[in-house]
Image (cartoon, grey):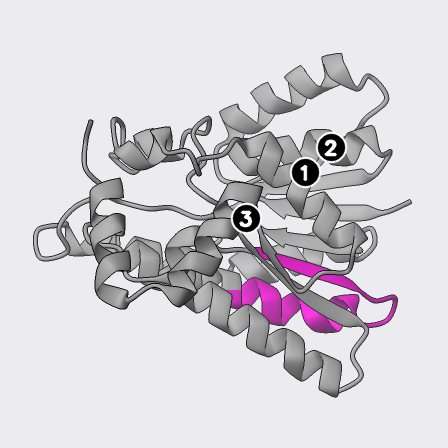
Amino acid sequence: MTRILITGGSSGIGLALTRRALARGWQVSWISLDPAEINAAQGALKVEFPEAEIDALCADLTEADAIGRIIQWVKKTEAPDILVNNAGIGFFGASAQLDPAREQAMIALNISALHAMTRAFIPLMEKKGGTIANIASNSAFQPVPFMAVYAATKAFVRHYSLALDRELKEAGSRVRVMTVCPAAVKDTPFKGAAGMDGLRTFDSFTSTTADEVARDVIRGLDGRKRFVVSGAKMRAVYVLTKLAPAGLVQAIVRREVERV
């Protein structure tokens, strides 16, 4: 049976991916922050998938002892075939005016925790092989005004994951890294938590849903892809951003983060 471990699995993209994994008969485990959210999500899934048992560890990935706790927890059972580093946060606003603690929180979770999880699980997964799927964003393709730090953290995820996958391939590792770049996801708690309610990007023709992203993640895993841009429309836009002048791309991106 395929074993998949998802950080941030109890909501948003993680929860949508859980549903698709359970529909395939996979064994799902979560690492999530909010115990009430974990319990509510487990209860809802038990109705949909009565035979499913979802193991969950409540943990703050940014705490100093988190990775050690997670590794000990995983070793009690079996290493996953798939690790999805999905947990992340974002905050909207001018960087010079945002609370610096919020910017540091984005860096701690989106970069440092993802990096630590990835490094910890490579040796753990090496024996039987597997895939680490790191969730980046379409904001990784270019700078995003008023989401300067968030976009920069996702650019890190994209560049780090692609480079690491190449290094592992050349080393003959049995572990692969898949980079996933979704468009703005309009049906998750992210936009409210990030202070992005009412932004044009969530009503854009390129916006997507959590289930569509989950579908593309599964397709990427099935196809052994190393890079996934989620959504056909977003893939077309990605190509255009590589061809268009940087100034034009910046103007379009700036418009996307306006309130409507």
Residue 36 painted magenta: no
Residue found at x 43% / y 52%: 138
Residue found at x 27% / y 33%: 200
Q: Which element type, helix, strand or loop, lies under badge 3?
A: loop
> From the viewer's perspective, is the residue at label 2 or at label 1 nearer?
1
Give the CA distance from mark 1 to mark 3: 14 Å
Residue found at x 82% / y 51%: 77
Q: If you read the primary sequence from the N terminus, does the residue marked by circle 1 or circle 3 appear first?
A: 3
Quadrant of the image containing the C terminus:
top left
> From the viewer's perspective, is the residue at label 2 or at label 3 nearer?
2
Q: Are marks 2 and 1 in contact (CB under 8 Å)?
A: yes
From which residue to which does the magenta span run? 115-134
Between 156 and 6, which is closer to the camera in this rendering? 156
Q: Position of residue 65 (x, y in %)?
A: 51, 60
Judging by the rendered image, the residue that carries numbered circle 2 is 20
Q: Amino acid at mark 2?
A: Arg
Q: Position of residue 68 (x, y in %)?
A: 59, 62
Q: Are marks 2 and 3 in contact (CB under 8 Å)?
A: no
Drawn side of residue 141 relative to residue 254, left or right: right
Residue 117 painted magenta: yes
Q: If you read the primary sequence from the N terminus, does the residue marked by circle 2 or circle 3 appear first?
A: 2
Local crowd at mark 1 within 10 Å, few (<14), some, or many (≥20)? Answer: some
Where residue 86 is drawn, which disc sits there?
3
Judging by the rendered image, the residue that carries numbered circle 1 is 215
Q: Amino acid at mark 3?
A: Asn
Task: For residue 137, say whether it is visible.
Answer: no
Give the CA distance from mark 2 to mark 3: 15 Å
Task: For residue 169, say whether it is visible.
Answer: yes
Q: Which element type, helix, strand or loop, lies under badge 2?
A: helix
